[in-house]
Amino acid sequence: MWSKQRDLASAGIIAAIGLITIIASLEYNMGTVRNMGPGYFPMILGVLLMIFSVGIVVFDVLFKRPSHDPEASSKSKINWRSLIALSAAIVLFALTIDRLGLAPAIFLTVYISCQADSKISQFKACVLAGCMSIFCILVFKLGLGLQVEVFDL
Amino acid sequence: MSLVNLFPDIAAGAQAALSIKTLTYSFLGVTLGTLVGILPGVGILAAIAMLMPLTFYLDPLTGLVMLASIYYGATYGGSTTAILLNLPGTPNTAITCLDGHPMAQQGRAGIALFMTTIASFIGSIFGIIMIASFAIPLVNVALNFGTQEYFALMAFGLTAASLITTSSMFKGLSMVTLGIVLGLIGVDVTSGVSRFTMGVPSFFEGLSLVALALGIFGLSDLYRDAGNLKRPSFDTQGFNISSMTPSREDWKRSIAPMGRGAGIGSFFGALPGAGGMIASFMSYSVEKRVSRHPEKFGKGAIEGISGPETANNSAVLTTMIPTLSLGVPGDPISALMLGVLLTHGITPGPEVISNDPVLFWGLIISFLIGNIMLLILNLPLIGLWVKILKVPYSVLFPIIIGFLCIGVYSVNYESTDILVLGAFGLFGFLIQLLKFPVAPLILGFVLGPMLEENFRRSLLVSRGDLLTFFDRPISGTFLVLSVLLIFLIAYQAYRKNKNRVMSHE
């Protein structure tokens, strides 16, 4: 059932992260117990993560009885549209804030985020983006003295 | 050190806390906090994380005062949505939904909100008394602390935090460990080597706490809700002061729960790893058990609000005791506050109270001020806040995204921080789908570097002898407690499984 699959996947992810941590920490000097190098502690943490992933398998997959709590064992639907829209909006902000300035960045970010809602009208989205840009210029640039260019084209 | 000896220090702190400057920022904090806390889906951690950058421009005391005020405002906002919309703004206010919303449906929303504020005020006062009484003795004990004790205490706090917040023990432990790993990203102070930075310059000083916190707490919720949220309908009746005053009967029924709540809250607050959420849950169960009419709970029993809200608030204050006097935060909120302190270059610990009593006591008093501010100003403004709830979510969430981006950018002016925000937003969303608790991650992140530092130094001093942690009684005790806690929870899980197996036979 879903909750078992979910917990198995969880264990897998944690194990993977643990492995990555161990591999990454091998790059650094281990040192000795007495004089720990930069790689020592992260290595311990990586090992712990792998141990914990086994714990998840044992305790959550094998031991736990099927939960009576419907919310805990139901699979939530992933809204791909909003996932893509919001991610794009944020990446866009990161790319444009330095190169294009505050106003374009905000405008684009808000406009793209609006797309997460499949029912939004494009006109409304533009209006909202525009208002938000103006608001942010007033509050952040003029009001709080944020060190950004408004238009950096 | 008796209370009387503390008077000059407390007075100095009070004077600093009551300056026009701090009062103004407190007012600002409370208002902004309420504004943000009232937005459905924006929890208190996101609210604090979002407004945290504003405090960086201020001096430490004012910054912390503002942060404390934001906390109160956000909690109040969270309670408001809990009562009016049955949507908890934060885990602490989840309990408030249970009886608060039925009360709203019975037309007693104003009374519920009023009681919430009063209960939180009383909780804060009690918490402050606890702090005043116990912080100094605790500090005296802490002066004997060596690196081993700090390590053991932090380890205990992290273990407890990861175990209590979730039903899956190992998921909690994994999150806390991952948090520590993330906290180690950056230049290692001891060896000068930069770890895990993948060549990104802005990572040299470590990941941005604000980007991480906002991503994991705020953005992840937005990812979940942006396309999906069904808005419950709510008609806003006129709120005036008279409709908000509780009746005599309400007061009578609330006094004892508030008293019990205060005690419960202080206890759980002082425990590293426990905090406001556990305290309010505990208080609710106690009240239900103690009540002569347990069947009334869940249908608008005012005890279901007064007890837990008091507990929550006194817990939040007493959580400051380990945070400020030992430098070990008890819950994500104080972890964030600890982060703020560290950003200002202040390392909490025994020295802070003696070296900078104005800061310490000023902060404590500012909690009181924030709460009073809330009482005076926000109660009449409820009508205004409720109007905000009428804004459609489809308009709200793009605005929130915009604020999130600017907020994160404003800290270091690094566009890579925005990418961190986005990445952890996705990560937080994914991890919550898989039913991992996210709060322990923040705790691990804030404490990670210190944990390692103390571990290393202990071993350096003891020349590699691991037993040094157990030779010393205090550190040994805490480490043993951590292990015991793990075994206890593991055993419980094993027992549950055994029962299931047996009942199937």
Image (cartoon, rainbow, N blue to C red):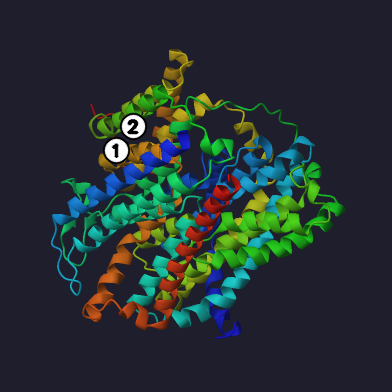
Task: Name the secondary structure under disc 1.
Answer: helix
Q: Amino acid at mark 2?
A: Ile
Q: Residue B222 in the image: state x and y as whole percent.
A: 46, 33
Q: Is residue B219 visible?
A: no
Q: Is residue B438 visible?
A: yes
Q: Which residue sits at x=74%, y=46%?
A: B112
Q: Would residue B29 appear left or right of A43 to someone viewing this image?
A: right
Task: Name the secondary structure under disc 2.
Answer: helix
Q: Nearer the viewer, residue B207 or A60?
A: A60
Q: Which residue sits at x=41%, y=20%?
A: A115
Residue B275 sits above or below residue B136 on the image: above
Q: Residues within 10 Å of mark 2 (few under 14, many from 20)?
A: many
Q: Which residue sits at x=42%, y=41%?
A: A7
Q: Residues within 10 Å of mark 1 (few under 14, many from 20)?
A: many
Q: Residue B438 in the image: state x and y as whole percent.
A: 43, 47
Q: Which residue sits at x=28%, y=29%?
A: A151
Examine the image and state in which quarter residue B89 appears. Answer: top right
| Disc assigned to residue A90 | 2
Q: Nearer the viewer, residue A29 or B69?
A: A29
Name the residue that disc number 1 marks. B419
Q: Nearer the viewer, residue B393 or B486?
A: B486
Q: Are marks 2 and 1 in contact (CB under 8 Å)?
A: yes
